[in-house]
Image (cartoon, helix red, strand yellow):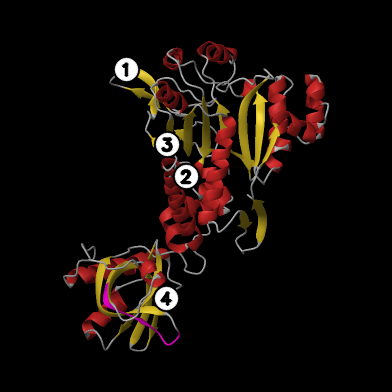
Amino acid sequence: MQPAPEHSESELLQFRRAKLDELQKRGIAAFGGKFEVSHDPGTLRKNFVEGIDVKVAGRILSRREMGKATFFDIGDITGRIQCYLSKSDVSEEDYALFIHQIDIGDFVGVTGQSFVTKKGEPSIHVKVLTPLSKALRPLPDKWHGVTDREIKYRQRYLDLISNDRSREIFVTRSKMVAEIRNYLHGRDFLEVETPMMQDVPGGAAARPFETHFNALDQKMYLRIAPELYLKRLLVGGFNRVFELNRNFRNEGVSRRHNPEFTMLEAYWAYADFEQMADLVEDMICHLAEKFCGGLIIEHKDEEGAVTKTIDLTRPWKRASYRDLVKGAAGEDWFTLSKEAKVERAHSLGVHEIHAGDEHHELDQKAFEKLVEEKSFNPTFVTHVPKELVPLAKQNVADDSVVDVYELIINGQEISPGYSELNDPIVQRQRLLDQAGEETQKIDEEFLLALEHGMPPAGGIGIGIDRLIMMLTGAESIRDVVLFPQLKRKTES
């Protein structure tokens, strides 16, 4: 007897425990072992061939009893396929076992033959059913899936079981990351690994996570960026190098920020920021065409209505930082006093500012609110003020800016790219000039490496999580990170 829908969760758990006991009394391994499979459920359905012998394993996702036969679906991350079990094909005892002791959520293996039902549904005619693992808790409601965001992120496995959209996003993410590697390998970039724990956190202005290295009795930091180590490799003769791995920044959590995130950084000796922009533009368009069906990316709500369209058609817009800020905040913006900038900013809706902000800080806050947040189609923002990017090469024609791009898509920065600063004297001074701000510390080992000579180079960073958000239409970074950081659940 199957429990009625109105049973409480504790009663459902008791029912399943009782079924587990019954299986064990019958000598059936409720948590079985090896099962030879010939096809995954979704792969079999996608590449269906009728009339072949198959062995498929998966979780029971639904079931429909029809007299002396039962239809049920089994599935995994590849998809699902329908199975047909007839009382006439198995012993009465085995059929009763399936009806009374096997639940939705249990893992089973089925052995049988592929066929197509009268309604045209690819199916498996089951001849042997093997229990593989008993689920002691019920799955989420099959029609509504996991709708509670707390459960969705904290118990991602339930989200993956019940929500097709979540499965699609994470499978696509995995394939995109693999394709990024293929793309760079095909252009002679070498993938490397650099330290996750560093004694000096450098490569970005961010607050690090601290730890202690007992064997060395010294404070260490989870890296905020791999940049300074990758540049050491340029000094050592690596001409094209990249790392695709995790960074950690002990900062806020939001729709667009997770303290642990995936970053691609790549460096190309003898290139500059414009070549790096070309590389990034080509790579992102390649991903869009391969995985999104083209260069027009539609973001949709839960009902399937289009809420936003992003056009990646090439060539992408390139404009200077100053021109964009003047276009949004006024042609006279850069001639205003700090007090006038504060007043203008407030009138334009830029409120997170302070009278003590320096000019470049006011400029950046106006840029973020008035330009970045409103730019959805790709824009390379070039020639950024040197105070904002201490690791980039100064522009020859205008020493107040550096040769940098910041790629904005979907209202957020996706990728920065530099003509890398390789002058150790200027680099030291730039880092010293940051004193008093929340900035990176001076890494003497990095400066020592620069003094041995680093070739001119272009470098890029790409926030992989934000890139996946843009390409898949996910609205929160938590929807593209399998296990986002959450506050520890307190005991009730």
Q: Which residue is mark 4?
A: 4
Q: Are marks 2 and 1 in contact (CB under 8 Å)?
A: no
Q: Can the viewer see residue 476 in this picture? A: no
Q: Is residue 469 left or right of 42 when viewed as pictured? A: right
Q: Is residue 420 left or right of 68 when viewed as pictured? A: right
Q: Earlier in the sequence, mark 1 or mark 4?
A: 4
Q: Are marks 1 and 3 in contact (CB under 8 Å)?
A: no
Is residue 254 located in the magenta-colored stretch of the structure? no
Q: Are marks 3 and 2 in contact (CB under 8 Å)?
A: no
Q: Earlier in the sequence, mark 3 or mark 4?
A: 4
Q: Nearer the viewer, residue 164 or 268?
A: 268
Q: Secondary structure at mark 3?
A: loop
Q: Earlier in the sequence, mark 4 or mark 2?
A: 4
From the top left corner, tell me how far across and down residue 470 is, in percent: 58, 48
Q: Can the viewer see residue 459 in this picture? A: yes
Q: Earlier in the sequence, mark 1 or mark 3?
A: 3
